[in-house]
Amino acid sequence: MGINQEAYHQLHLTAGLSLRRQLFFAVCDDIVLQGQLAYQLDADYGDEEAAASSSTTIVTFWIDPQQPSPLRPILDWLKHHRLQGKSSEVPLFQVLGIDRLTQQSPAVQNQFLASLSRLELLLTRVDMSLLLWLPRPWLQKLKRGVPGFWRMRSRLFEFAGEPSPSAVEHDADRLWIRSVRDLNRPDPPPELSGPPPAEISAANPLSVLWTMLEDAGRSMGVEMAPPDLPVPLILAPPGAVPESASLSSESAEAVSEVCHRYAELEAHWQQIQVLNQQQAGPLTLAQLYLGLGQLCRDRVEAGDSSPELLDLAITAYRQSLLTLPLNSPDRCDSLNDLGSLYWLRSQTETRGDAMVPWLEQSTEAYCQALQVPDALLNPDAIARINANLGAAYGLLAGLTDSVVNLKRAVQAYQQAIAVRPAATHSLEYASLQNSLGSVHWQLSQLEADADHLRQAILAYSEALQYRSPEADPADFAMVQNNLGIAYWSLSQHEQPGYLLEQSIQAYQIALEFRQVTTDPAGCAATCNNLGTAYWDLAQHHSQHPDQQLAYWRQSVAAYEAALEAAQQAQGVGLALNFDVWATFHSAGVVHDHIAQRLPEPLADERSHHLQRALALYLQALVGWRNDSHRLSLLTDSLAHNVRSHFEILGMAGQQQALSQVPPELLPDIMAQV
């Protein structure tokens, strides 16, 4: 669980106290992680040892978007258990799937919020507790929509995680996934140590993968023709699924072992075995294997993403596809599900090279889904599968053949966009445009091609045309931040003055909705980006000292705001997606420049900036002490600061500065002073 270990530990302990009439909120933007944590909590108190030591009963259920009130299933459970004489239990109802309501109409969302007011009354009268799992955008909606219910809360548990694959419904209430991430961090400018615009860390190969979008799998639309790309999609031949029509004895044994976990799987597997012995027809077996795969998929959706269950689901779908007719209406959805299962299976691997084969099979399955007869491919299916395909290629690009796979991702996203008009699918259209912009930005970093940045700016601008800051401020701010990064990146190639001003404007708009009180981690990242944009803009005004000084002041104010927001985010256990130590150093550099530029009569202000720069450098040392390259950069900055202390404050000022420098750095610094 990494950084979420402590938060889960607290949740686990709280659940075990069997508290009565309590209301808890668990906030997690990563929907897959959300399900895993809820499943783990359920499992922890479901085994015999836990049941014997605690009167806690965990009851888990998912919101039905068609009947979004959680009140009815809670009342049904309470009534059923009273009839069984189990009224001594103190149930903790944990509710998942609230994120799915984002895809529903305002009327459905309001129906859900209204039901919470009725739950408020139930909580005051019945010995039970309630745990709601939800992403941050829904937390804000809940605060505004049912403030009385919010005030009843006993505790809020926050889990770090980027928005990630969420449950998506299509014709048969299927979950499946596509993914996109905010931008990766660009290379640092020459005079600052830290990477400026950033949404995620690039510390390992997986960190360039994109965040899974909450509204995954829905169709997209666009009003302009996509440009031709030199790399075509590779469509796998229809016969590329398994060769054998029957399971080996080893495979059958493995299937049986996993099926024992769940009664519905075991019953279905036994039925398959009986019909195999009776030599049932291939179509009958195909439908049974498909049913087994779908049952497994539903368990995955509920939070069990173990490799064994995913392998079973994959095996079942592959067996079904062997004899499922090419013109079967189930074939397209089955291949799409299979592609998503391969995608999820890749996420269980810890090494990049182990992920690659799964992702390659994922793209192959999606491509096969696009090859079913035209009569079975409606615009919804085309958009959904191409969106999934684009996401899989994007993930694959982070591991192998980056340029080729990113260009395939671009083409897949554009083909998804082409089949849906923005006029009727505005939210989906905006999501896909944001995804497309992110892929173009990635390509710009690999090919040093400014045209990709122009395409990214166009895509983000299109996305913002159909994003409502009132309806979803967090998502609107994310796209604005991405637009600012794209403008900043393009400013490294052309028109720096104009493009940096556009970048600053985009960041400032993002910060209207990424406030430190509601989203400290996002606020910190965007403030860091803003500080770098102002720094770069100042460098282009060296002939105008007063204007340059003004930009430096704005730069350092943004960096300081980033550090304050970062401290608040870390204080509540939220992960940062940029190098905060680099921000300490960058802020110190700007303070040093301001101290040098200010006129001599402003001695107190100059002293303040020098001392603040020194304090920031010493903070950066905490994180950079074991990084030889960055430590060398920091030592140079400290030496410059010590010299400035002497030039501005005299020998006493220099001695005061040297007294704060760690002894092990003094020889290198004194050699430069």
Image (spheres, grey):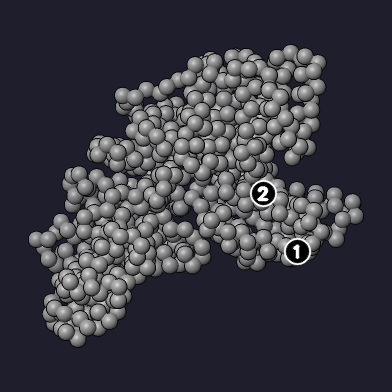
Going by the numbered disc 1, the residue's amino acid type is: Ser
Residue 598, image quadrant? bottom left
Give the numbered dot on residue 18: 1
Camera sees residue 641: no
Q: Look at the image and tell me in which quarter the C terminus lies.
A: bottom left
Q: Position of residue 616 (x, y in %)?
A: 31, 71
Is the residue 2 above or below the residue 229 in the image? below
Residue 664, image quadrant? bottom left
Left or right: residue 80 versus residue 415 is right
Left or right: residue 414 versus residue 344 is left
Camera sees residue 469: yes
Residue 54, image quadrant? bottom right
Left or right: residue 403 versus residue 419 is left
> Residue drawn 53% across and 51% down?
29
Disc 1, SS = loop
Q: Nearer the viewer, residue 458 or 556?
A: 556
First in sequence: mark 1 vs mark 2: 1
> Separation of disc 1 and disc 2 at Cα?
18 Å
Disc 2, SS = helix
> Residue drawn 58% across and 61% down?
7
Label pair 1/2, CB-CB below 8 angstroms: no
> Residue drawn 59% across and 50% down?
34
Q: How many other residues sit within 10 Å of disc 2, few (<14), some (14-19) or many (≥20)?
A: some
Q: Position of residue 90 (x, y in %)?
A: 79, 60
Q: Look at the image and tell me in which quarter the N terminus lies.
A: bottom right
> Residue drawn 25% across and 67% down?
635
Q: Position of residue 463 (x, y in %)?
A: 39, 41
Give the numbered dot on residue 39: 2
Q: Nearer the viewer, residue 247 or 168?
A: 247
